[in-house]
């Protein structure tokens, strides 16, 4: 597919998912908005260089991530969030519990995934890119993408389970003597 | 293929089903169809993935972001959009004729166009119903300058004395064409706003910029170079009132 890009249509189609991806990277709404704008600005400047318009989504997410990393190198103030290994043992997560979670809590959980795995998982959920497109975007082998997705999603489940158990009301069973008193 | 190997592959299967035709998944999907344990795991996995993806789409982008993106894309420099053909043709003309004035003239034109784009981008931003969204809302001019200094954004170098008496509305630091700039907004006694954009004057090199008032799209606009910065004053207030302060 090699026809001219309709920039307005491309922006309309992808800006919201790009913004969410930017938000997961920056954890800041203003910076996410600026990063999204900057990505489309670069697209507008280089749109004539994009030969295969079917790859514009991959190009946008790749460019946004590169811009974010470039900004990081300049600012060097991005908080590094370590994965907490103890939450690997969190209980299984039910669909109802996940539905009850706030969207921002899910986004926050994404940002707590170990950095090695995080970007692949973010792209998987936020861009709906295939594993091949993720491999192309991150410039890593397909097998590595599979491995990172597998480990990253495992961590995400554990983090969400921990988040659910933190927000759930604590039920403490009555002792026998308390039951008798009632 | 073991179930563990199948799970490893199926973990990358997108929840929207877009990978259904991808042959990489064929063997793993066939196995899931015939193995109840793997089928149950896959069903649960897809449910989890769908829920996470759906949850994340609940996060909405700011309402003004789309219009800001469109305005930003409008400001792209046309010189970067040249295709190689015309550039080669132009180069051939330059080489053959030995004229070096042609590229000089083009550069001048480009810079002039750049100023026009800068001006247009700022006015588009101000004209948008939800703009300007300020980073800092304060009536204190010193606080706006402190914030911009913190953000390493260009600041108003010297303010005309009369303007110092006006309360500010707030300020914002942002980027245009990879250059950082700032916007500081003042409230005039009439209630109208006076906006001051500040950018490094080197952005436009030594291009001549008229420093007289002009009307554009219902705005009064005036440029002014000051201490290495290019200031752009913009307001819809009556000209007589603006001139009292600038």
Image (cartoon, helix red, strand yellow):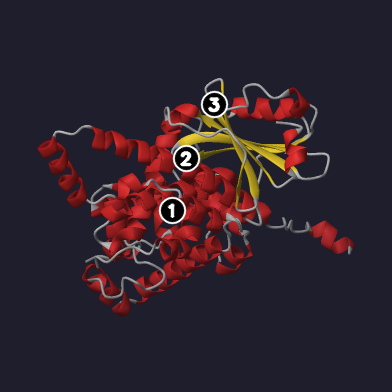
Chain ID for label 2? B
Q: Nearer the viewer, mark 3 or mark 2?
A: 2
Chain letter of the residue beneath label 1 in the structure image:
A
In the image, residue B56 sits, relative to residue B193, either above or below, namely below
Side (left or right) of B191 relative to A28: right
Residue picked out by circle 3? B229
Q: Mark 3 lies on which chain?
A: B
Residues B119 and B43: in front is B119
- x, y (%) of residue A61? 38, 53
Q: In this view, does A157 lie above or below B193?
A: below
Position of residue A126 measured from the top left corner of the image (x, y, whole percent): 45, 58
Q: Name the side, left or right, on which A5 lies relative to B55.
A: left
**Pointer 2: what residue?**
B115
The residue positioned 79% from the left and 39% from the top of the image is: B188
Work out which quarter of the rendered image holds the N terminus of chain A and state it. Answer: bottom left
Question: Which is more toward the observer, A122 or B65?
Answer: B65
Within-10-Å neighbours for mark 2: few <14, some 14–19, many 20+: some
Graded by Cα atoms within 10 Å as few (under 14), some (14 to 19) or many (20 or more), the crowding at tag 1 reads many
Q: Residue A122 carries which label?
A: 1
| Displayed quadrant of residue A160 | bottom right
Q: Which one is in front in this view, the residue at disc 2 or the one at disc 1?
A: 2
Which of the two discs, 3 and 2, labels the residue nearer the N terminus?
2
**Residue in view at x 42 percent, y 73 percent:** B43
């Amino acid at each position: 597919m090699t026809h001219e890009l309709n920039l307005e249509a491309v922006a309309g189609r992808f800006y919201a998912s790009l913004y969410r991806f930017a938000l997961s990277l920056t954890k800041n709404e203003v910076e996410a908005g600026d990063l999204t704008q900057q990505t489309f600005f670069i697209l507008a400047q280089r749109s004539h260089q994009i030969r295969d318009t079917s790859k514009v989504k991959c190009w946008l997410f790749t460019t946004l991530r590169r811009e974010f990393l470039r900004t990081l190198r300049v600012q060097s103030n991005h908080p590094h969030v370590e994965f907490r290994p103890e939450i690997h043992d969190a209980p299984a997560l039910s669909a109802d519990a996940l539905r009850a979670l706030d969207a921002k809590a899910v986004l926050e959980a994404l940002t707590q995934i170990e950095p090695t795995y995080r970007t692949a998982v973010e792209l998987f959920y936020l861009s709906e890119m295939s594993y091949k497109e993720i491999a192309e975007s991150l410039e890593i082998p397909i097998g590595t993408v599979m491995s990172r997705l597998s480990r990253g999603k495992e961590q995400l489940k554990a983090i969400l389970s921990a988040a659910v158990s933190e927000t759930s009301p604590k039920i403490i069973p009555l002792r026998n003597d308390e039951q008798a008193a009632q | 293929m073991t179930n563990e190997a199948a799970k490893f592959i199926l973990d990358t299967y997108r929840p929207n089903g877009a990978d259904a035709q991808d042959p990489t998944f064929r063997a793993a999907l066939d196995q899931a169809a015939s193995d109840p344990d793997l089928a149950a795991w896959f069903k649960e996995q897809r449910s989890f993935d769908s829920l996470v993806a759906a949850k994340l789409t609940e996060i909405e982008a700011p309402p003004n972001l789309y219009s800001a993106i469109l305005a930003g894309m409008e400001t792209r420099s046309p010189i970067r959009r040249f295709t190689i053909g015309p550039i080669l043709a132009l180069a051939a003309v330059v080489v053959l004729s030995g004229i070096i004035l042609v590229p000089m003239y083009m550069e001048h034109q480009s810079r002039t166009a750049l100023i026009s784009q800068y001006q247009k981008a700022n006015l588009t931003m101000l004209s948008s119903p939800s703009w300007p969204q300020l980073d800092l809302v304060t009536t204190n001019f010193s606080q706006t300058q402190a914030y911009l200094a913190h953000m390493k954004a260009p600041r108003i170098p010297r303010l005309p004395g009369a303007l110092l008496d006006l309360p500010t509305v707030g300020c914002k630091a942002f980027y245009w064409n990879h250059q950082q700039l700032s916007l500081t907004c003042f409230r005039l006694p009439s209630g109208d706003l006076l906006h001051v954009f500040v950018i490094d004057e080197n952005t436009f090199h030594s291009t001549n910029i008229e420093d007289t008032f002009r009307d554009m799209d219902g705005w009064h606009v005036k440029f002014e170079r000051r201490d290495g910065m290019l200031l752009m004053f913009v307001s819809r207030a009556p000209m007589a009132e603006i001139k009292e302060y600038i």
